[in-house]
Image (cartoon, helix red, strand yellow):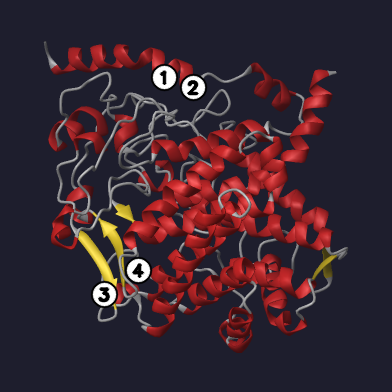
Amino acid sequence: MGSSEKVWVLALCCTLTMALAGSSSQYELALEDLGLSYDYKDALGKAILFFEGQRSGKLPASQRVKWRGDSALDDGKPDNHLQVKLVGGYYDAGDNVKFLWPMAFSVTLLSWAAVEYRNEISSADELNNLCTAIRWGTDFILKAHTSSTTLYTQVGDGQADHDCWERPEDMDTPRTLYKITADSPGSEVAADAAAALSAASLVFQGVNSSYSKKLLSKSKSLFKFADKYRGKYNESFPFYISYTGYKDELIWSAAWLYKASRDEKYLNYVVRNQGWSESALEFSWDGKFPGAQALLAQEFYGGKKDLSKYKTDVESFICKLMPGSNTLQYNTTAGGLLYVRSSSNLQYVTSSCMVLSVYSKTLMASNIDGIQCGPTHFSASQIKSFVKSQVDYILGNNPMKMSYMVGHGSKHPTQLHHRGSSIPSIHCHPSKVGCNDGMSMYFNSNSPNQNLHVGAIVGGPDSNDHFNDLRSEHSQSEPTTYMNAAFVGAVAGLLDETRGASATAAE
């Protein structure tokens, strides 16, 4: 059998799985045709489901993404003399490396969504799935923090992995381990891991109190490690280079620790170091100030008036995003999309929207009229409306008339830059697909991906609202955990819109 025949047979094998996973409901189309809100509940569920497709390790019986299989079951063995066990966690994007820094940021965002929109997510019957996604990440972070001054930050050789196109179930590239210590510090990563655990501890309060306490205890240990042994991560390792330094992560972490523990020493820390805070241009895996400022502004409105600088700084950030503001820093495309960078722009859209969504809710809860951007006033409802416009753009209200979430709507990306998604499932094709075969037969193929990675949000269109649905265009077609995690928070704030649209559509 020739290679082209093999591809045809393997595609046929997986057709039923793809069809079941990728069917779009007529209900979604009806809402769009009526010009009403999109089905945000459906989008939320799919955004959370995405994380099951990113899992590393031994998959549970409850696994819903059936094209995935067990992978990287020996992670940690290079340091086996230390009895390190690093099985589990998430692959951060379309590759097979586990980077703890973006993983921690993703977990923090998921936890933030669960804390801020718990009732809404529960009403959408997604709270259990969200908690499961969070715990898959926190369990790994707990494993990675093996001593008070040790945190494993990466599993896998990044260069070898990026030179290879194979599904995680077949992975044979080196699973090299990288760690930060007192001698080789990385304050950004340790602080982000601390933030993830403290945020998650809030999620599990009242659900699993012993686990919640464990998370908080380990969070305190990680924060102490990050603050005592200060050093930039990229000075120790050349992966995920930080351009903002570690001060933003330390404030972000301390803010979450105060929120989770109510220990005044963490509040004193952010007050004492508020000189670090600045009006930032973005909220991302690297730049945490807007997120920390939004958290601390909540405390300001709760009576902590010595946190006023954080309130001022987060409002300055929002003013840089809102169309019509005289301090606007970023334009929107002709189609209405906030445009920050040419590479994976939707990561900045989703993260910005999460901050805006949370802050608009904070203003409403505090009976605050809105914010002032020079001579222009923006009400909380206007800020929320801007978030809605961005979420709707992602879900299909754009010049391309396509959803940038895989599996949502009638038209969405088909050539995801994602190894496991592009190669036939191990359940359909048990034989190993090596690096070279993966590259020639699947990466270079013009055919749609073999498996539908439902819920994956891609990097998105360019500044002209144009999207190239090509696997090779990684800046446009690759998904990331932190992009999806931020979207969970942004769309959760719009769930009340779905209920209104559902009632109208039913009539």
Q: Regarding mark 2 in the picture, which secondary structure is present there?
A: helix
Quarter of the figure that contains the N terminus = top left
> Is there any visible trace of residue 336 in the rendered image?
no
**Which callout, 3 or 4, points at the residue further toward the start of the chain?**
3
**Which callout, 3 or 1, points at the residue further toward the start of the chain?**
1
At a point 82% along the width and 25% down the height, the residue shown is: 503
Circles 3 and 4, Cβ within 8 Å, touching? The answer is no
**Which callout, 2 or 4, points at the residue further toward the start of the chain?**
2
Check disc 3 and report the residue beneath it.
236
- Label 1 CA crowd tier, 10 Å (few <14, some 14–19, many 20+): some
**Which callout, 4 or 1, points at the residue further toward the start of the chain?**
1
**Which callout, 2 or 3, points at the residue further toward the start of the chain?**
2
Q: Regarding mark 1 in the picture, which secondary structure is present there?
A: helix
Q: Amino acid at mark 3?
A: Ser
Check disc 2 and report the residue beneath it.
22
Quarter holding residue 36: top right
Q: CA distance from mark 4 to mark 1?
A: 37 Å
- Label 2 CA crowd tier, 10 Å (few <14, some 14–19, many 20+): many
Q: Amino acid at mark 4?
A: Ile
Image mark for residue 484: none
Q: CA distance from mark 2 to mark 3?
A: 43 Å
Circles 2 and 1, Cβ within 8 Å, touching? The answer is yes
Check disc 1 and report the residue beneath it.
18
Check disc 4 and report the residue beneath it.
241
At a point 59% along the width and 45% down the height, the residue shown is: 488
Specify whether 302 is left or right of 208.
right
- Give the image location of residue 169, x and y in percent: 24, 34
Q: Regarding mark 4 in the picture, which secondary structure is present there?
A: loop
